[in-house]
Amino acid sequence: METLSAPSSVMRRIPTLLRAGALVLACLLPSCVGTIGGSTDDQAAVQSVPERSAFPRLTHAQWENSVRDVLRLEERPGFSASFTGDPLGGVFDNNEVVLSVTPNLWADYQRAAEELAALVVSDPAKVAALVPADEGQGNEARARAFIETVGKRAYRRPLTAQEIDTHVALFNEAPSLIDGDPFLAGVEHVLSAFFQSPHFIYRVEGTRKPRPDGLIPLAAYELASRLSYLLWNTMPDDVLFEAAAAGELDTKEGLRAHAERMLADPQARAVILSFHSQLFDWRKFGDLYKDPAVFPEFVPEIGQDLIREAELFVEDVVFEQEGGFHELLTSRTAFLNDRLAPIYEVEAPNGAEFGKVELDKEKRSGILTRAGFLAANGTARASDPIHRGVFVNLRVLCARLPPPPNNVPPLPPVEGKTTREIVAAHTGKGTCGASCHGTLINPAGFAFENYDAIGRYRSEDNGFPVNAADAYPIGGGMATFSDAISWSQLLAESREANECFAKNWLEFAYGRDAEVEDAALITKLGEASRTGMSVKDLLLELVSSDAFSTRRPVEVAP
């Protein structure tokens, strides 16, 4: 097993063996480059496995969930709320590239470990959940049993004989370091060490003999951790530990069977929602501002309503409809309360409580025609085709857009024209923004001009008829659409959008950026998604791939 260490500047006096390691866009935008679609730069690339870290760090949410499950707590302890935040690193918060242990975060881990350990030993019920009852077997036997069982959960694998002996020695030295009951001092000291260990903070994947193809197969307990953190965002449960011990995870069929079991558990719903929340940026919904003089009905509480609406919609598509990307972009099922129903011009089915409705097929189609996305990508008073178009290009089509230039002035007020006319005049065809805006950004955003700043349907803008028709380069040619309904349908059926969805899921599932080696897998999953694969089946395919169950050797700098 590899050894991890932190810089000496951030070390403390803990056992040496257990130390933890440390858009406003306008016509000045440069020309577009690259292609529309996923990461399949080289369509002829063979399916192989990109290099990745053998020591991915737990996210703060994973740390919370893991502590809860190691200690058998009913709730997450909440310590990570004060942890040093991680820098932004792409769309998803589990990208291993940015999940480092800085000196400040290392100090946060230490403080939390010590406070958690003290919290546990102050509560007899919490101690009883971790330590065998005294039935005359002696304190050393109880201590050893505690170390083996809790250590297995903390390290997500059985401890070696040497590790057990080392922790027993820690247990025995505790009374000289911590006042109070000697046995409880040992429990506190060992728990503090567990939560400061690299084997807890990181998902350590040890060195094994490579296969003939050069890939290193993950050990059974390492696979159990990968599977559990993907589908539940926490450590493996007892069933998964037993499966690892029995060799049930050594085959792709065994992995898939346990993935199916875990997807049926309520914990999987939180992970599915986390993916869609980050992909569609639901966090923006909570603090939206709309001009009360124009939209007096847009009260502050609506922000949380929009988040809940999106959650219920995704849950319905994935778990009730057993649907996939197509249903996400085309389903008219919605969940509304009395604050949201007026935006959709329907009656609230359950008053203040959320209830299920079917929306007008001429006005709504899937997640891109829902008030959350539209309001989050609208100004305080008007629609915002530029931001809507950029979002669809980046998050739904994985188009490569260059960054916007600095100090771009805002568009002039809409007076005597529609919003579309103003945007087109300054950034569209015939201007210096024609390459990106006129071809990619504006058409993708103009499709949503039937929706105002809060996502309410309209047929007029500033007193003039709305024009939501346009064309977009997709599927090998220029595809035309008449409005957001036909645009959503076009996206749902396109190779480019389905491959983008597959690419996003791959990055979320594997906790890393997609690489050229992933091209074949993304192409395969994109085509399966385009022809009807459900979200759950897409996840099962990701679990069954070589990229999930193996890794490439990684050169370690001396």
Image (tube, rainbow, N blue to C red):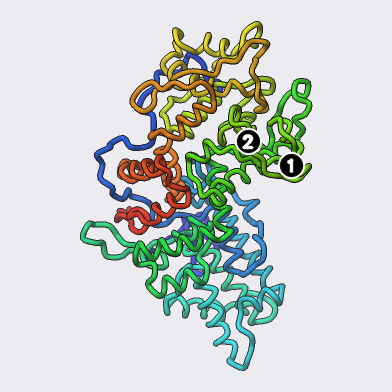
Note whether residue 558 is visible. no
Residue at 77%, 32% (x, y): give it. 299
Sequence-earlier tag: 2 or 1: 2
| Residue 546 percent across, percent down from the top left | 32, 55
Q: Amino acid at mark 1?
A: Pro
From what the image shows, is residue 467 above or below residue 163? above
Outermost residue toward the left in this view: 212
Outermost residue toward the top in this view: 416
Lateral position of residue 516 relative to residue 300, left or right: left
- CB-based contact (under 8 Å), mark 2 and mark 1: no
| Residue 446 percent across, percent down from the top left | 54, 20
Outermost residue toward the bottom in this view: 136
Note whether residue 277 is visible. yes
Q: Which residue is mark 1?
A: 349
| Location of residue 78 by image quarter | bottom right
Which disc, if any, is residue 284?
2
Q: Nearer the viewer, mark 2 or mark 1?
A: 1
From what the image shows, is residue 231 above or below residue 152? above
Label 2 SS? helix
Residue at 33%, 49% (x, y): give it. 51
Task: Assign the C terminus to one quadrant of the image.
Answer: bottom left
